[in-house]
Image: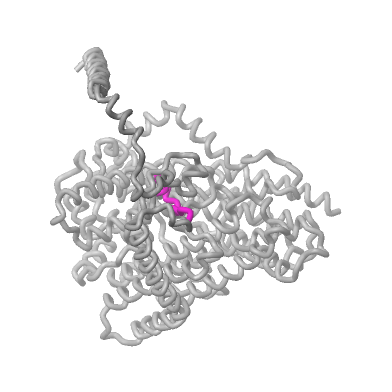
Amino acid sequence: MTMENETGMDSNMETNGVEASSSLEIGAHDNSNTTPMKRQRLGKSRTASSYPRKRALRACQICRTRKTKCNNEKPMCGCCQSLGAQCVYDEVNDLSTFDPASQIILERLDQVLQKLDEKEVESAGTIHRISQTLENLRSEQVSLTTTAQESVTPSLASTWQALSTMGENVESEKDRKLQLDENMLTPSARTSPDAVLDWPVFESCYVTGFITRELFDQNFIDDSRTDKSEHDISQSSAFINEEAVPQLVEVFLTRVHIKSPILDPNIAREFGFKIAHEGLRWDAPSCLVLIMCALGCISQPFGDLNSCNPSDSWVKTSRAVLGGRDLSLGTAYFTAARKRIGLLTPGVIATQCIFLCGVYEMYMIHPVKAWTFFANASSNFFMYLKCEESHFKKDTSITKSSDTQRVEASLYWSCYKSMCELRTEVPLSPSLLSQIDYAHPLPEPPTNFPSGTSSNTSKTTFAKSSIVSDPQREESELAFETLQEKAWFFYLSDIIISRLGTRVLLNLYDNDFRSWNAHNLLYMIKAADEFERQLNEWRISLPDQIQFNDGIKTNHELQFTMQARVMEVETWLYRPFLYYMIHQSSEEIPERVRQLAQKSIDSSIHWILHRHVRHRHHGSWFVGRLILSSAISILAAVKAKMRLDSLDDWKEIMQEAISVMDFWADESPDFAVGSVVLQKLSQLVDISND
């Protein structure tokens, strides 16, 4: 059909619409012949038994504030439902204007509300039992390690329930005092290096967003370099080896999937073996396999972190150290997958493909490109859930299997969480998934793990793979059931700590640093004490498989990552008190604030000296950004002449942070700019302190 025909059809439809509208209006006027009758009826007086006319229903508080029309639906109006806000109506105390029937109804409603309040008081007692619940969880995990006959499934299921209960109880204990994370709408870019660089102590040395804007400049420049991208696409198919697909899928499952289990491992293997025998196609399974292979190429074994020697490692760039050949091979598979992205229809596999493309870009230290994929995955999954909801309403006999529900819940949380994490560093819009009242607080882990056959197949495949290094081959000797079980422990705990981090941001970073003043200090201290308590309870609840010791650097990636997540939340929690101590006179600083500010300095130093890992993973960019913001906060403390023993070696600490920036500078331009900023600020601070 030509464009002219389409335009003509649109104009005809618009004309018909106008005519139809006009006919309705004419019909309305034709029915107005009884106007004299209506005027006569309006003149009639009301009988004595009539009750007084009551005013129109009042809008809820949100609609009155926004000055929007309220449909007065109860318990939540349409506007509040679309915004995901709490809908509150003003109480009506004067019931004299209501007819007797309405008064009786209101009386009955009051009785119902009274009973609900009594139930709420009873449920509040469960909060005091959380410690016992967590202790029971610990006992179950000890029993798991000491009793060989105990099955894996019941332990994991009970852990899931305990973690779910903890997530609900922790957030309900201070409902009236602290903001909750109902929609996880975290404040945007309030913890970024630019946010610290804007502190008054630096006297506006740099414009707002000086570091982060390089990320957007890079993507604008890359978009104009069509000659290079076309050459890469034309050469990409030459590297793809379909026979190596099953091996790469296994590498993906062991190195990437365990940290974000958004698909069924058995189905992934089936797709991989099918492509190895039948070849690639232009369908969703081929697209999914290609992006899994791309991640299998660029992912690295975690190795022994304690054996790393920083003095030898930072002299090289990340691409030189981490292997250019594997990165090129990963690019070939990724390019082939992107060719198929546009052919996908909204659904689970399409969302998995797009989300994993975002994970790939995070591995490549391209956060803005990754956000584009995460946003598309969220939009795709949002549309899928809407269509699914409509379909299930038409046919209520349809039920979803537990495997389908698990994959959908994992996709929801992975997409949502990934966008929330990026928003902490970059000023970007929230996910569409925030508009969905999702029914599952946590994904439910599998009831049955793969059999021993799958485990043996996994070992054989790893042994044949030339990509797998010796440390990873040793890890692959573990039963796949144990590895997947540990992965689910990690995944569920990671969601809980992410939500706890969101609460910290909502309560302490909802406004910028100007809110960290004497007027809000008492609230800040109470919030810090409460979140410290919640962090401690969360640590106690961790299963033994992913437990860690704060003073010991672990060699297992999942435990190392979990330890880093806790430190990240602690860094966010304590930084406002460092700001307060820097910008207030020393006579006005309470002792508790000094303690929290010292914790901020300690966590920042720890990030720089002990978290500089030469490991390419989903969170590599976040680690670099947190090291950069930590270094800037230390410079702020030194510039303010804070007397702390831990700051005596601040120059050596800055050199370590600069070396981290230089290591990743070729990957992400904000690290290159960050290195320059740290060097210049170090010089200025050194001069000002002389």
Q: How many marks?
A: 0
Q: Residue at x 50, y 67 (%)?
A: 563
Q: Is residue 243 left or right of residue 576?
A: left
In depth, the one of 190 and 152 nearer the eye is 190
The location of residue 42, given as percent across then percent down, is: 34, 33
Q: Is residue 510 left or right of residue 422?
A: right
Q: Main secondary structure of the magenta part?
A: loop
| Magenta region includes residue 82 | yes
Q: Residue at x 39, y 80 (%)?
A: 137
Q: Which residues are magenta?
A: 79-91
In depth, the one of 242 and 118 nearer the eye is 118
Q: Residue at x 56, y 45 (%)?
A: 665
The location of residue 331, given as percent across then percent down, is: 37, 42
Quadrant in the picture for the N terminus: top left
Report if residue 625 is visible in the image.
Answer: yes
The location of residue 490, given as percent across then percent down, is: 40, 67
In depth, the one of 65 and 56 nearer the eye is 56
Query: Farthest residue toward the right?
Result: 690
Q: Residue at x 30, y 67 (%)?
A: 445
In depth, the one of 531 and 95 nearer the eye is 95
Report if residue 327 is visible in the image.
Answer: no
Q: Does 113 appear above or below 348?
A: below
The location of residue 118, given as percent across then percent down, is: 41, 74
Examine the image and state in which quarter residue 608 appears: bottom right
Q: Does 59 appear above or below 552?
A: above
Examine the image and state in which quarter residue 506 appears: bottom right
